[in-house]
Amino acid sequence: MQADFRYADLMNDDVFKLVFGQESSKDVMIEFLNRVITDRVIVDLDFMDKEMKSLDRDRKDSVYDMFCKTDDGSRIVVEVQRRKQDSYIERTLYYSTFQIHNQVDAGRDSYAFCPVYVISILDFNIDENRGNPDVKTVYRLYEEGKHTLLTDKLTLIYLELGKFDKKIEELDGDVLEGFYFCLKNMHCLDECPDVLEHGIFKRMFDISELIKMDEVTRSKVLMKMTTERDLRNQMAYARKEAIAEGMAEGRERGLAEGRAEGRAEGRAEGRAEGRAEGRAEGLAEAARKMLASGMTRETIAEILELQVAELEDMLQ
């Protein structure tokens, strides 16, 4: 397969697993985790089975992007997510329950277990953090009002790369920001920038360079990246076509109603409301057409850049 890329796209979850879920790249993963997790030092880790089977047939199984156990017994789940999803916070909480449950032996009296971390690397901003400019946010169990830590056994960490917009010339040596930049931009680069041409980042670029991978891994990575690129192009085209078609049918009705209200009330707001209603009606009409063609609600929401809940409200 012909390569159109020099470096792997690390925000593709499958590519991330292929590149960093290997023994040969464990040093990079350890360095990254030590920059993200600051309450303990990770000396070594083991990559574990990423598939968690539920003991209850009525509960969903869980498949992580990466799951590892550190030298002190801590469990770390890493999830890479490019596209926004409804209930993502609940999803990370659900993932944590497997690692708590699996450590408590039914034959023991003790409920003691090692710390569990769930790290989410996101190429979008989560609604619950709206208004918070920080790329990295850390959540633990604290007493309300007094900020007293109840336990260090559960930590949820979110890295919202949608908030990271620094250019290469703006990097000032902060290692974690260097990781953010590489995760978000490496696949767009033709060469390793001078400012990152050292230490762990040089190593990161080396193991992410397609031509240096073994043939099997390179083929898998290229297939995932090409599929991702094609999907994004198809979604962009589908969104453009669907909205244009829906707007053609919905805009006139919304605008006409808005203008009528505006004339009746003698206010300019009527025209503005009409434009807004026209756009909403256009999106709704586009969504109905995609539903009729057999698309799932999740796919439609992704194409129209909506939450599934927003789409449901729009279709009512």
Image (cartoon, rainbow, N blue to C red):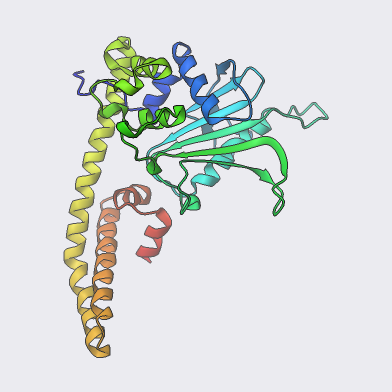
Q: Quadrant of the N terminus?
A: top left
In-front residue for pair 93/292: 93
Residue at left 34%, top 38%?
A: 166
Task: Give percent across and percent down for residue 308.
Answer: 40, 54
Above or below, 50 against 277 in this view is above
Give the left or right position of residue 190, taking residue 204 as reference.
Answer: left
Q: Quadrant of the C terminus?
A: bottom left
Above or below, 53 against 260 in this view is above
Residue at left 40%, top 59%?
A: 310
Above or below, 293 against 316 in this view is above
Dividing the picture into quarters, in which one does residue 112 lie? top right
Dividing the picture into quarters, in which one does residue 175 lie? top left
In-front residue for pair 183/192: 192
Give the left or right position of residue 72, taking residue 221 as reference.
Answer: right
In-front residue for pair 37/99: 37
Residue at left 38%, top 43%?
A: 162
Task: Give percent across and percent down for residue 250.
Answer: 22, 68
Q: Give the number of marks.
A: 0
Q: In the rendered image, is residue 59 in sight?
A: no
Task: Give percent across and percent down for residue 195.
Answer: 33, 23
Residue at left 25%, top 90%?
A: 264
* Residue at the front extreme of this rendering: 172
Task: Give percent across and percent down for residue 153.
Answer: 68, 34
Q: In the rendered image, is residue 267 in sight?
A: yes
Give the left or right position of residue 238, taking residue 58 as reference.
Answer: left
